[in-house]
Image: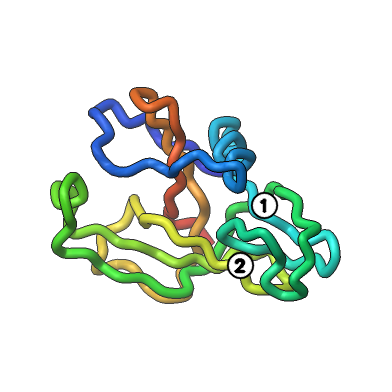
Amino acid sequence: MPVVLEPSETPYLKPLPEHTERNEEFLAGLAQNRFLVPKCGACGDYNWPAYPACRTCLSEDLGWTEVSGRATLFSYTVVHRGPGAFGAEVPYVIALGELEEQPRPCLVLACLVGIEPEDVRIGMPLEIALQPIPSEDATMWRWVPRAH
């Protein structure tokens, strides 16, 4: 089960995911404190983000599957000049984490919180954290450092 962060108490001024037929089950999972990723029924690979077909075998037999949320930092960038509401949080880290679930590497993009940018290292252990945004009736996903 993902870490659940304190709800955002301030007005949320950043863009939120658009609800579409393709991501509705994912967003519903977030609201239930579950992190779901499309898994191919034909080859077993995990696919992120949601796409109409498996990126490995092109099967359309995809089903939303709960994952551990544990990952390793694959890549990241530190943002020093953010647009609009993001500017109030600079510097911040955008991280690409590789989920433990395999066989195909499944990379998830999210902000990394709970660590200073200068302490971030490729290969560090991460886990998904969910942050409720009560004012928007939404939940956002983030990366947080994970203890070894």
Q: In which quarter of the image is the N terminus?
A: top right
Badge 2 crowding class, 10 Å Cα cut-off, few under 14, some 14 to 19, many 20 or more, is some
Task: Give the residue type that dot 1 points to.
Answer: Val
User: Looking at the picture, how far across and down is residue 32, in whole percent?
Assistant: 60, 31
Badge 1 crowding class, 10 Å Cα cut-off, few under 14, some 14 to 19, many 20 or more, is some
Q: Is residue 136 left or right of residue 13?
A: right
Q: In this view, does 135 lie above or below 139?
A: above
**Residue at (24, 29) in percent of width and height:** 11
Circle 2/circle 1 CB separation < 8 Å: yes
* SS of the residue under disc 1: loop
**Residue at (74, 71) in percent of width and height:** 58
Q: Which of 53 and 103 is in front in this view?
A: 53
Tag of residue 67:
1
**Which quadrant of the view contains residue 133?**
top left
Q: In this view, does 5 lie to the left or right of 21?
A: left
**Which quadrant of the view contains residue 57?**
bottom right
User: Looking at the picture, how far across and down is residue 75, in whole percent?
Assistant: 42, 74
Q: In this view, does 115 lie above or below 35?
A: below
The residue to which callout 2 is attached is 106
Q: Is residue 59 above or below residue 19?
A: below
User: Looking at the picture, how far across and down is residue 101, in whole percent?
Assistant: 69, 63
Task: Give the residue type that dot 2 points to.
Answer: Cys
3D distance between C-alphas at marks 2 and 1: 11 Å
Would you say residue 1 is visible in this rendering? no
Total numbered labels placed on residues in the image: 2
The color scheme shown is rainbow
Would you say residue 124 is visible in this rendering? yes
**Residue at (37, 56) in percent of width and height:** 112
* SS of the residue under disc 2: loop
Q: In this view, does 121 lie to the left or right of 125?
A: left
